[in-house]
Amino acid sequence: MELESKIEAILFFKGEPMSRKKLAEILKVGQVEINENIEKLKMSLQSRGIVLQEKENDITLGTNPEISSLIENLQKEELNKDLSKASLETLSIVAYKNGVSRAEIDYIRGVNSSFILRALSIRGLVEKSIDPKDNRRYIYKPTFELLSFMGVKSPLELPDYEQIERSIASEAQKLNEEIDANDL
């Protein structure tokens, strides 16, 4: 399989921006090869519904701006749907933890939450930022839009905040202990 196709598959699977350096590490090739194949991929996607988006050193797959009205209509339809039980679970963890990694969410829920986090992000209910402790992962937080919708100024005003936050923190601590035990 061509390197260009592997890059496309990785970007599709991850569903989030990746650095060129990380792609080179994953594919065990040099930076020059990565850059050349990213350009090939960019060219092959030119007249398609998917495009390669770039910001600084990160790249990701996105939708072609020429079909933005179609995507906007689909997005509006999606935003008007009720949230699933899994979405509500994930949203609760994000809101009460007010800064949580996907690994912590997955551990607490017991299942992979990637697609749910992406859907909540698209709906403008959660936002992600790079973890200041580890720039290889993201931290998810509630958006101002979510807090406004819930009628609170801060996650601290959520019902039973202290009790639920302690319970979530306890589960997150178990995850960290498991990770530390596996590192030994």
Image (spheres, helix red, strand yellow):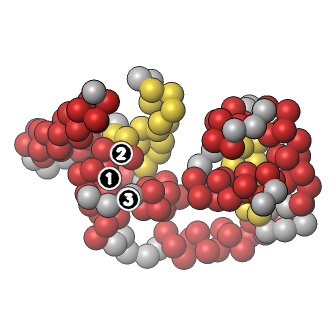
Q: Amino acid at mark 1?
A: Asp
What residue is shown with label 2?
Answer: 103
Q: Amino acid at mark 2?
A: Ala
At numbered mark 2, what does the secondary structure look like: helix, strand or loop?
helix
Q: Which is more toward the observer, 48 or 162?
A: 48
Q: Which is more toward the observer, 55 or 111?
A: 111
Question: Residue 131 location in percent, x, y?
Answer: 44, 30
| Crowd around label 1: few <14 · some 14–19 · many ≥20 (10 Å) | some
> Which residue shows up at 43% across the image and 76% down it?
81
43 sits left or right of 126 in the view: right
> Which residue shows up at 41% across the image and 43% down it?
140
Q: Earlier in the sequence, mark 3 or mark 2?
A: 2
140 sits left or right of 164 in the view: right
Say whether residue 157 is visible: no
Q: Earlier in the sequence, mark 1 or mark 3?
A: 1
At numbered mark 3, what does the secondary structure look like: helix, strand or loop?
loop
Question: Residue 4 location in percent, x, y?
Answer: 81, 53
> Which residue shows up at 43% across the image and 49% down it?
126
> Which residue shows up at 32% across the image and 61% down it?
111
C-alpha distance separating marks 2 and 1: 5 Å
What residue is shown with label 1?
Answer: 106
Q: Are marks 1 and 3 in contact (CB under 8 Å)?
A: yes
